[in-house]
């Protein structure tokens, strides 16, 4: 468990409360954000067709999560930055996290985040 995951576990009640009923565990919250950051990085590295538009979409989701955390008196920018730091630490050490989440499950979370006010 990373320092970020430990920190998020300490904040699990306020975070889960902020994202009720989307996430039922802090591990799912962490995994979805980690995968959002990973997708942004892969897009910027591989530059597939329409990659700039796709990155804007990914950044929109990151911003939406940050603002939602901020609206619940949590430091969204720092939380997302800490998760990004974990991802890049894994990346430079060639570690590939497996959160046991299917693409369909990830997309389901994304759709629910999209509906946040």
Image: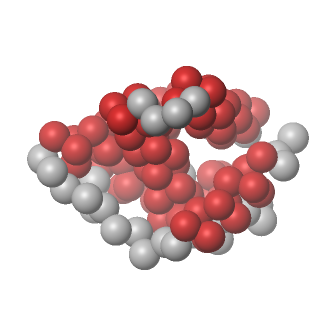
Seen as rendered, the residue at the extreme front is 49
User: Residue visible at 63% across and 52% down?
Assistant: 15
Residue 114 seen anywhere in this rendered image of the structure: yes
Residue nearest the viewer, comparing 105 with 34: 105
Measured from the top left, where is residue 77 in percent x and y? Answer: 53, 28
Left or right side of 64 for 52: left
Residue nearest the viewer, comparing 114 with 48: 48
Residue 55 seen anywhere in this rendered image of the structure: no
Which quarter of the rendering shows the C terminus? top right
Left or right side of 59 for 22: right
User: Residue visible at 55% across and 67% down?
Assistant: 103
Seen as rendered, the residue at the extreme left is 93
Measured from the top left, where is residue 70 in percent x and y? Answer: 68, 31
Measured from the top left, where is residue 43 in percent x and y? Answer: 44, 36
In the displayed structure, 9 sits above or below 66; it is below
User: Residue visible at 70% across and 35% down?
Assistant: 64
Measured from the top left, where is residue 82 in percent x and y? Answer: 39, 37
Left or right side of 109 for 38: left
In the displayed structure, 8 sits above or below 78; it is below
């Amino acid at each position: 468990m990373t320092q970020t995951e430990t920190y998020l576990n300490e904040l699990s009640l306020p975070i889960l409360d902020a994202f009720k009923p989307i996430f039922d565990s802090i591990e799912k919250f962490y995994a979805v954000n980690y995968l959002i950051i990973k997708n942004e990085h892969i897009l910027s590295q591989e530059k597939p067709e329409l990659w700039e538009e796709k990155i804007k979409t990914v950044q929109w989701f990151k911003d939406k999560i940050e603002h939602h955390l901020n609206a619940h008196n949590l430091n969204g920018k720092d939380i997302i930055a800490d998760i990004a730091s974990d991802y890049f630490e894994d990346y430079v050490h060639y570690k590939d996290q497996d959160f046991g989440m299917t693409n369909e499950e990830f997309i389901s979370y994304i759709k629910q985040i999209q509906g946040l006010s």
